Amino acid sequence: MPAIEPLSRLIGINLSLLNKEERILLEAGLFARIYEELKELFAVQEKNYFRLLRLTREQENTMLEAGFVHTIIKDILSTGEYDLKGIAQYTDTFEEVVEEFVTGQNTNPSAIFLRRLINLHSSVRRDLYSFIINKIIDQLMKTKNDLNDTSSKDDVCSAK
């Protein structure tokens, strides 16, 4: 089952009503939201370091983005569930390439590698992803409710 299915059910989206292109766009949008939430969490972890360096917000974002894959791999390794060889096998990538991400020699992963890495990360850090997914769902529901409230007010105004 693709990762998008359980999430789409939680937020009330019937995937069978979407064509293939719409599903891909939905998955990409959710992937982008998960990426932003992870980046925000990593920024909190590095807050003191960034303060010491007196970085601007833009510089912080650049550092977070450049080190994103490194941070994910480091977090997977910290669980003890996978070593570099296991990460390489799971992501179907050469171990040397994974090592390049760890050492910072490579900061530009392919989309396929990043997707597989985040899938692996989500399997070893279920609690973290549960928190992120719940936060995204709460934000989506708030937006949906705000839209419904606006729509209801527009209906009342047009009825007068």
Image (cartoon, rainbow, N blue to C red):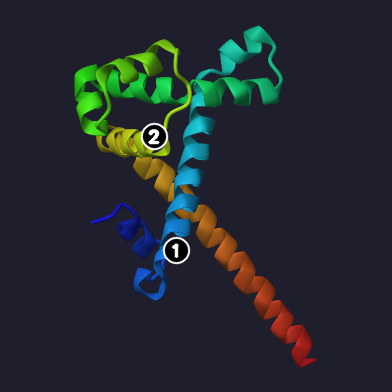
Q: Secondary structure at mark 2?
A: helix
- 46 to 111, vertically: above or below: above
| Quarter of the rendering containing residue 43 | top right
Label placed on residue 68? none
Residue 44 visible in the displayed image? no
| Quarter of the rendering containing residue 80 | top left
Residue highlighted by disc 1: 21
Instruction: Name the side, left or right, on which 110 lies relative to 140.
Output: left
What is the residue that sits farthest to the bottom in this orientation? 159
Residue at the image point whose x is 31% and y is 58% from the top: 6
Q: CA distance from mark 1 to mark 2?
A: 21 Å
Q: Where's residue 88, x and y in %?
A: 24, 25
- 86 to 35, vertically: above or below: above
In the depicted view, which residue is nearer to us: 35 or 94? Answer: 94
Instruction: Name the side, left or right, on which 68 lies relative to 86.
Output: right
Amino acid type shown at disc 2: Leu
Residue at the image point whose x is 50% and y is 44% from the top: 32
In the depicted view, which residue is nearer to us: 77 or 16? Answer: 16
Amino acid type shown at disc 1: Glu
Query: Badge 1: how crowded within 10 Å, few (<14), some, or many (20+)?
Result: few
Instruction: Name the side, left or right, on which 53 lies relative to 11.
Output: right
Q: Secondary structure at mark 1?
A: helix
What is the residue that sits farthest to the right in this orientation? 160
Residue 8 visible in the displayed image? yes
Query: Badge 2: how crowded within 10 Å, few (<14), some, or many (20+)?
Result: some
Residue at the image point whose x is 53% and y is 38% from the top: 36
Image quarter hosting the C terminus: bottom right
| Quarter of the rendering containing residue 125 | top left
Q: Where's residue 41, x and y in %?
A: 49, 30
